[in-house]
Amino acid sequence: MFLELEGVKHDIENFSAISFSVFYHDIIYDSSSKSNEEKSALYAADRLKKIGLDQDMISKTEAQIIATKSHQKSDDTDTDYLLDADLSILGKEPAIYFDYTRKIRKEYALYPDFLYKPGRKKVLKHFLELESIFKTRHFREKYEQQAKENLTAELQLL
């Protein structure tokens, strides 16, 4: 994600906050949990308080981490850059994307296909039904078309 954000660093208002968000957004991750983002945000807030960061920076970081749960367009441009960097894998070349999907399936190996496939299809369709997967012009121009092709191809395999 840092490599993706490097190309738009000059457009990011608070690169420190977004850096903390990148670092902590998946610090707590359990594939069977629906509260990873909230737990990661709380963990980040606790750690950032301990190193003496001001409350505004902590609050911004917490909000950005929580935003990675729903990936909805934000009023905060920095948050949109974070969300787009988080989804950038969707627009990578097919070999990289399908390697990612194999890792996702392995991550959710505890679920049999009859449970995994409908859930995965729902996620793919959700992204394909969006007017745009990416919220910022930079990421739309760079990844939107390939992301839609990748998601469509994966959907056809399920």
Image (tube, grey):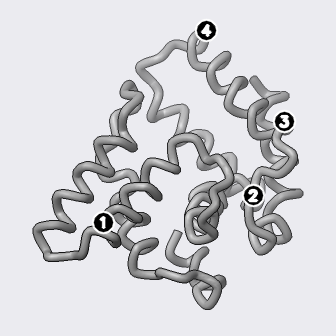
Q: Is 141 placed left or right of 44 in the picture?
A: right
The residue at 38%/25% (across/down) is 32
Of circles 1 and 3, which is in front? 1
Going by the numbered disc 4, the residue's amino acid type is: Phe
3D distance between C-alphas at marks 4 and 1: 41 Å
Contact, CB < 8 Å: mark 4 with mark 1? no
Please name the residue that numbered disc 4 is placed on: 114
Tell which of 103 and 46 is nearer to you. 46
The location of residue 158, given as percent across then percent down, is 75, 23
Residue at image coords 68%, 46%? 98
User: Disc 2 or 3, which lies upstream in sequence?
Assistant: 3
Q: Earlier in the sequence, mark 1 or mark 2?
A: 1
**Outermost residue toward the top?**
114
Q: Which residue is mark 3?
A: 129
**Does label 4 or label 3 sit earlier along the sequence?**
4
Q: Is residue 7 shown above or below 86?
A: below
> According to the image, label 1 marks what residue?
58
Q: What is the secondary structure assignment of the residue under circle 2?
A: loop
Q: Secondary structure at mark 3?
A: helix
Q: Which label sits in the foreground, 4 or 3?
A: 3
Label 4 – label 2 distance at C-alpha: 30 Å
